[in-house]
Amino acid sequence: MSRWELGPILRAMTRNKVGAILIALQIAVTMTIIVNAAYIIVERHTMMQRDSGLDEQNSFYLTTTGFGADFEPKRVITEDLDLIRRTPGVVDAIQINAIPISGGGWSMSLTTETGDDADDVNTANYMTDEHGSNALDFNIIAGSDFVASDVRWRERNQTDWPDKALVTKALAESLFPESPWQESVGKTVYIAEDEPVIITGIIDKLQAPWIGWSNLEHAMITPEYLVSESTRYFIRTEPGQRDRLMAELESTLADKYPNRIIRDVTTLTDTRERSYRQHSAMITILTTVMFLLTLVTAVGIVGLTSFNVNRRKKQIGTRRALGATQGAIIRYFMLENLLISAGGLLLGVVLTIALNMALIEWFSITALDWFYIPIGVVVLWVVGQLAVLGPALRASRVPPAIATRTV
Amino acid sequence: MLIMTNLEKTFRTDLVETHALRDFNLEVKEGDFVSVTGPSGSGKTTFLNIAGLLESYTGGTYMLDDYNVATLNDKQRSRLRNEKIGFIFQSFNLIPDLNLFDNVDVPLRYRGLGSAERKKRITESLEKVGLGNRMKHLPSQLSGGQQQRVAIARALAGEPRFLLADEPTGNLDSQMAKSVMTLLKEINLQGTTIIMVTHDPELAMQTSRNVFVKDGKICDAADVHTMPLASNQ
C-alpha cells in the first residue's frame, strides 16, 4: 500500500486546492442533477410502457358526423357497425364515447352506499355494446359479458344509467377493498349518489383516457349506444390489416352515406405517441442534459489533469528518475482524481438527496430509489477515471531525463 | 561496477545528426568519487543521463553492476534507478507541495518499503544532513543550501550504491557550496560511489579522480592536478 501515495497526494492537494475544489463541486452538481434526472427518466419511461389493455398495434378509430334533416343516427350507426364488422380483415368494431389514453373522455364518481356523505371512487366511463370485449381486447375474469339485449340507446339529454356495468379489476378493488375483487360481481354501486348499477362482470384491464390521472386503471363500461349525429367508431383489425382498412373504411363509409364528414382517422399507436409526447420530450431533454453535464465534467477533469501534467512535467521527470515506473505515474494521477471525485461524490450524495426532497415537496414526485445513488457514484467515478486516463498516459511518457534539464 | 565501452549517443532530426557522445570509455570502481568536467555542450549531462539510466544510448555497451543496461526494459530501469542510484540535481528538484518528510519519502515508496522502515530512513537521512528538526517544512521555507541538503537526504535514504550529482553546487553561493561538498565527501568516505558533473575546477580538485569531456569524448582521465581547466560558461 505504501506505493499508493495516498497521504502525500492528500497533503499536496490541501496546498493546491482551488482547481481540485472546483472540479469536486462540478462533480457534485453533475451527480445531483444526473441522478435525479435518471430517476425521472426511468419513472417516465416506466409510465410510457404501461399497458392500456388495447390491441394498440391493430386498432384505430374515426369520427363520423352526419348532417341534413333526414339523417337518422340510430339507423346509420346500426348499419355502419354492421358494414364495418362484415368487412374482411376487421376483428370487431364498436361505437364508443371515448378512446382510452387519448386525453379526452367521461368520468364519474361511484359510491357503494347511497347518500351524499358516502366515500366515492372516481372512474372513467365507456359506453359500448356486447362487442366491447372483442374490440377493446379485454377479458371477462369474473361474472359475465354483456349480451345484445342489455344494450340500450342513450338519447340526447338522457341522464339515467343502465342497471348493469362491467368494471376493471382495479376499480373493483378500490370500490370494495375489504373483500376479494371476484366478490364484487353482483354488488351494487351508485351513480349520482342514489342511482344503482349492478356489477355484472370484472374485466382484466382497460385504462382511462387520461394518462396522468391517478385512477388510470379505473374504468367502467355501460351497455349503451349514444344517439348522436357525431359518433366515434373503434375498430380492431387482424394483424397487418390496420393501415389498409383505415383508408378503405373511410372511403366505404363516405360512399354509403355521403351526407357526413369523416375525420380523425387515427391509430392507437399515434394516440399513444401524442399522449406521451410530453414525457418523451422530457426524457430527450433530460438525457441531453445528463450527457452534456457528464461531458462538461469529463472535459473539466481532462483540463485540470492536463494542466497539472504540464505544470508538473519536471516533477514527473524527477519522480521517474527516483524510480517511479510509468505505471506509478499513471496511478498517481488516477488516485489524485479518485480523491477529488470522492470529495465531489460525497457532497453529491448529500445534494442529490436534498434535491430529491425538494422535488418531492414541489412536484409531488416519488422518493428516489436508494440504488440510484450508488449507481450514480460508480458512473461518475468511472467517467472521472476514464477522463483522467489520457492525461495520465501522457504524463507517464514524460522522459526521466527531463529531471536534469535546467530550463 | 560501472563500465562504459565505446558508448555512443547520437541525436537525430530530419536535417541534423549530433554526436553527443562517441567512443566514450569509462570505468568507475566502487568507492570512487569521480568528477566530470568539460565545456558547455561537451556531453557531460548526456553522460550523466545515460549513467543514471535516464536516457538510452545508440551504440556501445554499458554495464552497471553486471547488468547490461541495453537489455533492460523501462520497468527494470526504473527499479534499478530506485535501488542502486541516488540523484542530486542542480536545481534540487524537490516537490514544492510536499514537506521535507514526504519529499524524502518519494523514492522509498516506489521501492515498496513498509511505513516503519521508511520513517526510520527518512529521519536518519534528514538528521544526517542537519535538517531533522524541519521535517514538516515545505521546500519554499528553506534556503537553497538547505534544499540541496534535502535532495541529498532523499538520495541517501535509498542507500544507493551510486550517487549521481549534476552540478550540485551550481545554484549555491560559495559558503553553501562548500558545506554541500563537505557532505558529499563524508558520504563518499562512508563507501558510496559518487559521480559528479561540475563546471567548477575547485570542486573537481576535491574529488579522487577527474574525467574531462570534450566533444563527447573523454580527453583526459589524469590526476586532477594535471587536468585542463574547464570552461565556466
Image (cartoon, rainbow, N blue to C red):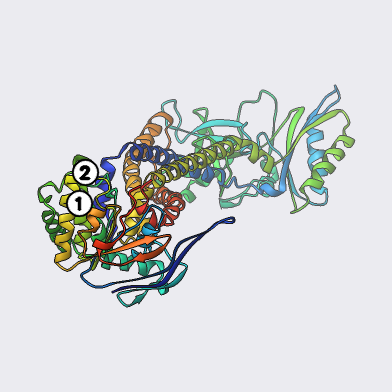
Q: Is residue B72 visible?
A: yes
Q: Is residue A2 visible?
A: no
**Residue B129 x/y as whole percent:** 14, 54
- Decide which of A48, B84 is in the foreground and name it: B84
**Residue A377 x/y as whole percent:** 38, 48
Q: Is residue A391 left or right of residue B152?
A: right
Q: Quadrant of residue A321?
A: bottom left
- Picture residue at 27% right of the left edge, 68% below the top: B84
For mark 1, give the secondary structure: helix
- Decide which of A23, B25 is in the foreground and name it: B25
For mark 2, give the secondary structure: loop
Say yes or no: labels 2 and 1 on the same chain.
yes
- Picture residue at 47% right of the left edge, 67% below the top: B58
The mark lying in front, picked from 2 and 1, is: 2
Q: Mark 2 belongs to which amino acid? A: Asp
> Which residue has dot 1 on it?
B150
Rendered-image quadrant of the N terminus of chain B: bottom left
- Decide which of B85, A332 is in the foreground and name it: B85
Q: Quadrant of residue B27?
A: bottom left
- Picture residue at 35% right of the left edge, 57% below the top: B38
- Decide which of A289, A55 is in the foreground and name it: A289
CB atoms at circles 2 and 1 under 8 Å apart? no
> Which residue has dot 2 on it?
B173
Q: Mark 1 belongs to which amino acid? A: Val
Q: Residues within 10 Å of mark 1 (few under 14, many from 20)?
A: many
**Residue A337 x/y as whole percent:** 36, 48
Q: CA distance from mark 2 to mark 1?
A: 17 Å
**Residue B206 x/y as whole percent:** 19, 59
Q: Which chain hosts label 2?
A: B
| Relative vertical location of residue A350 with respect to residue A339 in this rendering, above or below | above
Q: Which chain hosts label 1?
A: B
